[in-house]
Amino acid sequence: MNAEPINVTGTPIRGKGEVLLSVENISLRFGGVKAISDVSFDIRKGEIRAIIGPNGAGKTSMLNCINGFYQPQEGQIVFKGERRAKMRPHRAAAGGIARTFQNVALFKGMSTLDNIMTGRTLKMKKGFFWQVLRHGPAMREEIEHRRVVEDIIDFLQIEHIRKLPVGKLPYGLQKRVELGRALAMEPELLLLDEPMAGMNLEEKEDMCRFILDVNNQFGTTIALIEHDMGVVMDLSDRVVVLEYGRKIADGTPDEVKADQRVIDAYLGVAH
């Protein structure tokens, strides 16, 4: 019998089905423009949940609401059973929500290792005084955090670039480093905003493999925005479809692929 999967903190995870996060009747406006209109869906623990739709559908805005970057005017977010009208970014991060971005957001002059190390910031317990001294308890803590980061570097197979400035790396490797930084936060929910954007076929295949491994080996729940429908259909457990800020479909990949509204709005046109 296979061992029960564990997450990065070593805690056994349960099977898919328990709701980890739900958005309830979320609406977001910028002036007179409605980015999201009365959208509700949930993300279950242990699943890969895709969010798809045409450009301008509100996908990234929805991720921004989930991790607190945007504050919706209406609706609520429920995360791990806690209901709140607004999610603050620091509370989202501290509570176990990590994020990658559509455009790579890394410290270009810093090494791969140091960029991933920034993902450990919220895990550090010693105060500023000890961090400055880099001695005693703070040094022991840093060594432990570096061990976690080195494990992530090994997992993502980027040992050969660990000391290189990320600004000198190819785009596909920068996206992998950004994934590593998010994993360093030990998230329960990982939000991926177009992780395959700008990649060639080989880079996409590598990223797909890492996403599946993160989900299967660590038990990390993933919400994924992606335009490559082959990737979405292969990776996802469930798919929610947005169009002009409204939800038009929600179900398994096969159900969504066969939905005429989705075909008319998205799958039936070039995108």
Image (cartoon, grey):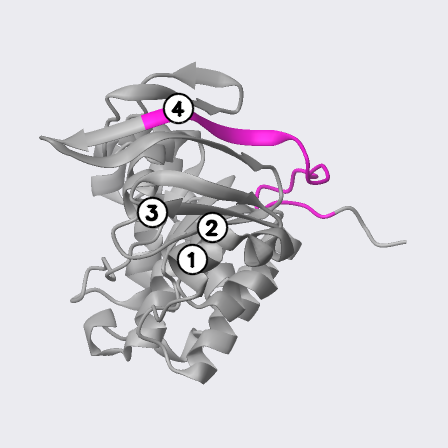
Between discs 4 and 2, the one toward the N terminus: 4
Between discs 1 and 4, the one toward the N terminus: 4
Q: Label 1 belongs to which residue?
A: 264
Q: Label 2 belongs to which residue?
A: 261
Between discs 3 and 2, the one toward the N terminus: 3
Q: How far, Cα to Cα, is label 1 from label 4?
A: 24 Å
Q: Nearer the viewer, mark 4 or mark 2?
A: 2
Most extreme residue toward the right is 1
Q: Position of residue 121 (x, y in %)?
A: 32, 41
Residue type at mark 1: give it: Asp
The magenta-colored residue range is 5-26
> Callout 4: 10 Å neighbours few (<14), some, many (20+)?
some
Q: Position of residue 233 (x, y in %)?
A: 57, 62
Residue 25's disc number = 4
Between discs 3 and 1, the one toward the N terminus: 3
Between discs 4 and 3, the one toward the N terminus: 4
Vertical comparison of 40 with 103: above or below? above
